[in-house]
Every structure is written in structure tokens, then in C-alpha cells.
Image (spheres, rainbow, N blue to C red):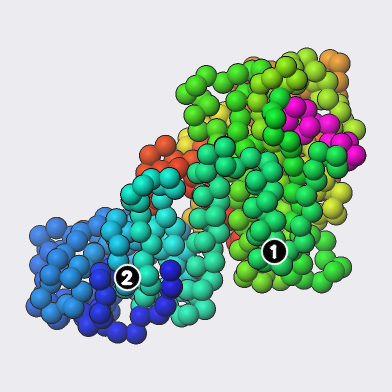
Amino acid sequence: MKLLPATEKITEIDADAVVLGIYADGQPTAHAAQFDQVTDGLLGRLLEAKEITGKTNKLVPLLAVAGVRAQLVLVVGLGEKEKLTRGSAYRVAATAARRLSLKQRQRVAMYFDDAWSDETFQAAAAGVITGCQGQDLYRTEKKRHPFGEVLLAGAAAEELSQGQIVGEAVNLARQLVNEPAAQIYPESFARQAQEVADACQLECEIWDQARLEAENCGALLAVARGSVRPARLVILRYQGAGADQRPLALVGKGVTFDSGGLSLKPSDGMLAMKCDMAGAAAVLAALQAIARLQLPVNVVAIMGLVENMVSGDSYKLGDVLTARSGKTIEIHNTDAEGRVVLADALNVAVEQGATKIIDLATLTGACCVALGNDVVGAMANDQAWCDAVTGAAQNVGEPIWQLPMFPEYGQQIKSQIADIKNVGEGRWGGAITAAKFLEEFVDDTPWVHLDIAGPSFLEKAKPWMDGGGTGVMVRTLIEVARTLK
């Protein structure tokens, strides 16, 4: 799909469909005013009759409008002008694209507001790309049809190119999550990472079973023991700055399927567990975009890849594992496996000399209980670094909220026979005790843990996105890399 600037007026452009953005507070854009003039006040009459309100993401199709070359005009609400953000622009454009992608269209033109900033147009371009992709990977008849080309009025070619790179990264993460576990497992995920590395000229290092054993990755390997699929750990390196600059580390949980192990999940709880590698998918996708955007920063991406399955060799409750760092872990729940995998991956990040670390994981249902399914939980050992990460999320419009990391929570993971245990005391504060567990493996490196368990997977569609994988936090990670100081 090509994204190009639109240079013709909305009423004159030759397209299969055009999109017209309308503000809710009655402030007309130049495109709306021109449309209203040519159509003899049609827009004004519809606004007066409240057939069109301009409320955010509200769609009203107008067919065969006299004076307009396109057969379909899709009016989309932009909300109140002073409240428009990069995040809302992303969703508005995605909402319009999603509606129009229900049938094949070669050419679509979008007219929002020429006064938008370059960053806002980039966000809209990314939204167009994500709105056209669904989760119907294996449907005989596809529900979504990407357009041949999209023209955005008021946008420059450079902003459209950058927005497309971001949107394609989000879609990569979504596709990886939406693929069934029979297709995406540790070895195949590692191959996908190698393909991204080759395409983006990244350094790629893949640790196989023998290398993991040689590296003493006892925590990660214990989780993988129950599966016939061998574990992998992937390290990708992007060098966008000088060799003397220590890297930012992005660490992703890559449990490609989670049965719960011997602490077996019920069927309903297992159904969407192909998404338990969404953290690793976000890390891989973000690094792809960072490299394609040629951002002036050094980044190392680390993905711990396992299946958590049941067999005669599954790791057991009461086992004591020795992590790569040398710390010992008593297992009280084999379904709290993600943090065990990340224990070794985070230690690798520290060893790589990371100046700052972000890990992403579909880690706890407790975070969903605390924040719902639409908000990412952030926990950290460094407030300034947490502020930078949450600020980046807010800039791009990904909902996030910081949870406390009081020392008292750390007492809950103390073990009687090992250094720590992999769960806290009972159900309460489970997202935070999981983060306190991870904190044990980052030393003094500034670190932020993002629990994406809720927002990583949509059970049903939103106006701007089909159900399934969301690619959550990909845009945030790119923004962090853009603004890293």
C-alpha cells in the first residue's frame, strides 16, 4: 500500500472513496468549508440536523454527492479541536480505514486538517496502515482489504513514509500474536527475527539449546523442559549512534504458548495463550521500525522464547532453579513462568551493558484486575526513567498507569529455602510482586517493567482495530527511542 500526499481538492479528486474529518465543536476545516460550498451547504444542513456530530470516530457515509467525483464520502468525527492528540489522530484514521477496507478499493483520499503537526500526520498515517489489517489470516474470504494507495491531504511525503514504517511495525507485532502456536514457536519466532535482522541490517545472535546450557540459563530452560519445542534466546543489535554509546535494552517475554504447565490453566484461560509472546513481538517490531527510521540511538533487543507445556519432564512446584545470575528461585506456581523466563533475559540485558532497560510481558491477570484490559501497568526502579517511558506512551496515545513498588512487596517473594520464590503471598498485589521478582535481576540499571496482559489482545473489535493482537506498546517503544537522552 502506498501513502502519498493529496494535492487536489476533496470534491475534485478521482478516488474510490474520500474521507472528510469534522470537528465536534463546529470549527470547519478548509476541506469541510470547500466541500460545503460545492455541495450547496449539504454539510451544514446535516450538522444542523445532528445527522453528523463530529464526535470522535463517529462515521457517516454519504453516497453519490452531487458535485463530488468520488462515489463515497465517509465523514469521520475528529472530536473537539483543542483536544485532538496524536493518539486520537491515529485512531480516527484507523477507524476510517477499517470501515473502508471492508471491500477492495484501489484509491482512497483522506482530508483531515492541514493545520495538523508533522507528528500528528505521522500518527494518522500509521493508523491508516493498522486499520486495514485484521486477524483473518486463515479465512478463505478475507474481511480486510488494504488499499492500493492512500492520499492524505496536508501531509508531507516524509511524514507519510515515517508513519507507514510505524504502522507496519505495529502490524508485524499483531500478525505474530495472531498466528497460531503451531506456526509461531521458539524456533520459528527466532527465524522471523533473523529475517527482520537481514532486512534491516541488524546484528542477530540466536542462542540454541546448547548455548543456553553453556550460558547457565537455568530459569528459562526449566520452563521449556515440558515442551518438545526447544527454547531460544534472540539478541538483536541496532547501532544508530557511536560505538561508545551504551545501548537501550528492550526485553520481551516470548512464551509462544502457555498451558500453565503443571499448574494447568482451564480451557477458557488457555484459548488466547498464543498471545503470551506479545512482549517479544512488540520488541521485535519496534526494533524493525527503529532501524528503518534510522534513529540515532543504540538498541539491543532480547527475546526469551519458550513453550510452557505439560510432560513427564515439566518443571514442578517446589523445584529450586538457579538463574543465569546465580540467584536461586523456588517454584510455587508453574503458571507464573513469564517472570522466570525474563529472569535470565534481563540478566543478559545487564551483561550487554545496557544504560536503561524496558521489559514487556503479558505477565499477570492481576494487572487486568487493577487496571482493566485497556491500560498498561508500569513499574520501575527509577522514577525519572519511568516518567520518560510513560510520557512517551502518553505522547502517542497508549494508555498507561504506574503502580507502586514499595519495599514491602519485595518481602512477599522471599523464600524459605531459596533466594526468592516466583509468586507472592496470595492473590493480592500480584502485578507488583511479579515486578519485584523481576527487579531482582536488573541490578542497579534504570528499568521499567510494562505489564501488557490486558491491552495486548482484543477479545472483540474496537472501532479502529479488529480483534486479536493489538501491537500494544510498539509505538511507545519507538517514541522512547526517538526521544532518548
The three-letter code of the residue at mark 2 reads Gln
Give percent across and percent down for residue 57.
31, 56
* Res 185 quadrant in image: top right
**Residue 400 showing in the rendered view:** no
Residue at image point 35% right, 54% down:
144
Q: Work out which quarter of the rendered image holds the N terminus and state it.
A: bottom left
Locate residue 289 relative to residue 327 in the image: left or right.
Answer: left
Whether residue 105 is visible to the viewer of this picture, yes or no, is: yes
- For mark 2, what is the residue? 106
Q: Residues within 10 Å of mark 2 (few under 14, many from 20)?
A: some
Q: Nearer the viewer, residue 272 or 395?
A: 272
Residue 234 versus residue 296 in the image, above or below = above
- The structure residue drawn at horizontal position 42% and vertical position 78%, both measured from the top left corner, is 4
> Residue 332 in magenta?
no
Magenta stretch: residue 222 in it?
yes
Circle 1: element type: helix
What's drawn in magenta, residue-wise? 213-225
Q: Position of residue 325 (x, y in %)?
A: 88, 37
Q: Nearer the viewer, residue 104 or 55?
A: 104
> Residue 461: x percent and y percent?
37, 44
- Crowd class of label 1 (few under 14; some 14 to 19; many from 20; radius 10 Å): few
Q: State how far apart marks 1 and 2 are (Cα).
A: 31 Å
In which quadrant of the rendered view does residue 208 lie?
Answer: top right
Q: Secondary structure at mark 2?
A: loop
Name the residue that disc number 1 marks: 198
